[in-house]
Amino acid sequence: MVAKDQAEAASETLDADGAPKGGTSLEPAEARQRYYNRELSWLQFNRRVLAEAGNTSHPLLERLRFLSISASNLDEFYMVRVAGIAGQVAAGVTTLSEDGLTPKQQLDEIETFVDDLVDGMQSVWRDLSEQLEAVDLHIVEEDDLTAQELAWLSTTFMDRFFPSLSPLAVDPAHPFPFIGNRALTLGIEVTRAQDDVRAHNLLPIPGTLPRFIRLPKRDDKAGTIRFMRIETVIMMHLEQLLPGREAVAHGLFRVLRDSDLELQEKSEDLVSSFETALKRRRRGQVIRLELDAKMPDRLSSFVVGKHRSAERTTVLQKGLVGLADVSQLIVSDRPDLTFKPFNIRFPERIRHYNGDCFAAIRAKDIVVHHPYESFDVVVQFLRQAVADPNVMAIKWTLYRTSQNSPIVQALTEAVEAGKAVTAVVELKARFDEAANIRWARDLENAGVHVVYGLVELKTHAKLGLVVRREGDNVATYCHVGTGNYHPMTARVYTDLSFFTADRTIGRDVSRIFNFVTGYAEPSKLEMMAASPFGIRNRLLEHINEEIAHAKAGRPASIWMKMNSVVDAPVIEALYAASQAGVSIDLVVRGICCLRPGVPGLSENIRVRSIIGRFLEHARIYVFGNGAPLPSPRAHVYISSADLMPRNLSRRVEAMLPIMNETVHEQILGQIMVANMKDNQQSWSINADGGAERVVPEPGDEPFNAHEYFMTNPSLSGRGEAVEESFPPRVSLDDQPRLVRDGGQARPAQADAAKGSLVGRSQGTRDT
């Protein structure tokens, strides 16, 4: 089959609604050769996160943070993804995944992988613990305390912890209680002094209590920071909780529960359905039971038996139970052990217009690169709209936001100022559903027109629209983003906020809002593309165009940056493009089901993943359009959508073409090139799903994309005052680069005629 036919065949894997057809039509062996398993790929990503905890180039407490993130990631993976697969196994489902595995086979491979991953986490924790000791940050035991400290701890326990703790007897009159999701629980076997009768007690440790209790500084050790684990403190004061009882055995355990939500498709009241589903989540089935390996056998058998836990869901932790809690050890008074702070910039061009966002946007499109440039730009844009008497209406999508959100507050104030305000609130924001319900009701009470999106589709697009009267005309100012309107995550997620007064884009954004609020299908978008109808088709069209360029002997290149690559039709189209000679470079932070570098299939595809100080989150799609990349001729898009079936078929997403010359150059020539050039925090993804660190070749200069963006202003945000001093553009010609060819490295110049970008990936560490 020729390359174009393969791309067309990829399109034919969609059903009538544009969604991928279920299961795989390939034989399992062939499917395994073409696709890497989604769940295993996510675990590979989390292994890369864990590897950063062992990366000695990071400050010590930041390495501890990576360990905590990796552990927290794994918890959520079990609560959602593994829970879903386990449910399929229990229901007897045998449908094959895209890579040709049954649910049971997937579960078996996940458990094998996780066993090794968890062992690695505990090994990293032991290593970090020793290094923390070396810098005077200690986790101490009872024998390490002075009499004065023991007295302080006793008073603190009674005042701060005792009132929140409730020991629960387990006997014929007291059945085994419900244990909450992710809650730490002490299992205790006790005796009475007078008759030596043994009994079981459980002591749930509320999540509102600290896992690590910081002790007061000692005069003789002024520079020393000391903590105690809360379970240690509780056992020291067991007499206060269970008078007359003596512990003969104890151990810590916790459960992870199925936390995915299921909704009735035809719900009349979406909010009520979510509230009911949230209650079910809290009592979901146990999907993983973790016990301290030091727990005595008789007590562990009791805990396992009471949970009716199958053997495969029970895990003995040979180390710290609940590793995500180690983030509590990251103390603010040791800045020498954390990343150096950097100055978040406010775009100079808006300052040039004396802070008038409308004037700056009206003059020229602008893109703000978070977190290097301040999220306050978004807030200031909205606040200016609230205060401006000429603003008639505001429309905004809200997917995730913070407590006391300035966005929510501004929308409320806009209603009070007499403006028409519409907020599209997505309730299906995993683990933020309850918070979204609360502030959505606050918005409704203030008079905002709150729309809860669609039952069948999650509204994931990041859009804002301001309608302003300007003389006899009406202007629309739009914000199109790749990330959430969350001022806290905007400090650590790399995202793009695009602002424009372009009337065509304004009409398209209005049509997308109308779809969500009134089911008016946006079938006539003029510039943008929107899911669930258009993003996949637009991407496939551009991929086919690059195939045509390659066949005609013209340069043909594709660059993409996203969080995940899962969608089979897009993957098949990229394979077809590779076979036609299109040079393809992908920057994929997380899941990658595409297998790069496979001879005869994907030898022209290279995939890298950047794991560093900031979490890569922006989605950027670039097509060479017959010119070598980077090029002013290239088609450049930003989007809220990853290349996943859920984003392209089951969500409302937006994808925006970049037409402004300066913004085009910033996204392509600055952001994308810097990502391709990074050799300090990048990994090369291999065909087997594993990864190798990208390392500089001898003589190459180290280049860290995050450090570059922290220290250099963006192109579109620059003002006239910094125009002359703007640094040179990032250049891929600064160093020779290599590309894999059937497992062999060859000079990049061999691809010069095709305009390829090649990324060096000759790391030696196999994670």
Image: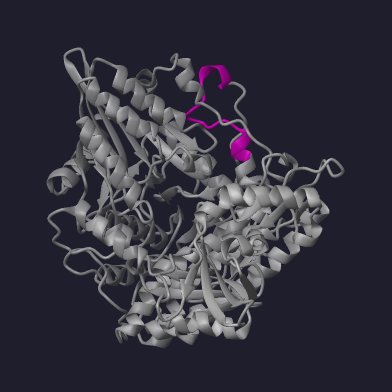
Q: How many labels does the image show?
A: 0
When asked about the image quadrant of residue 298, the answer is: bottom right
Q: Is residue 92 visible?
A: yes
The quarter of the displayed image where residue 35 is located: bottom left
Q: Position of residue 4 (x, y in %)?
A: 32, 68
Is residue 557 shown above or below 252?
Answer: above
Coloring scheme used: one colour
Classify residue 575 as left or right of residue 5.
right
Q: Which residue is drawn at 43% across and 17% down?
A: 355
Depth order, front residue of 762/449: 449
Q: Can residue 576 be seen in this view?
A: no
Quick check: is 148 in the magenta stretch?
no
Query: In the rendered structure, does residue 721 fall within the stretch colored magenta?
Result: yes
The residue shown at (50%, 75%) is 289
**Seen in the image, is 162 located left or right of residue 82?**
right
Q: Quadrant of the C terminus?
A: bottom right
Measuring from the top left, give residue 405's x and y in whole percent. 39, 35
Residue extending furthest toward the right: 220
Relative side of 697 to 565, left or right: right
Q: Where residue 700 sits: x, y (%)?
A: 73, 51
Q: Taking 22 as reference, is 591 left or right?
A: right
The quarter in which the N terminus is drawn is bottom left
Q: Where is residue 699 in the image (x, y as percent from the top left)?
A: 78, 52
**Residue appearing at x 57%, y 52% in the figure:** 161
With respect to residue 319, does 161 lie above or below?
A: above
Q: Give the range drawn in magenta.
A: 708-723
The outermost residue toward the front is 194
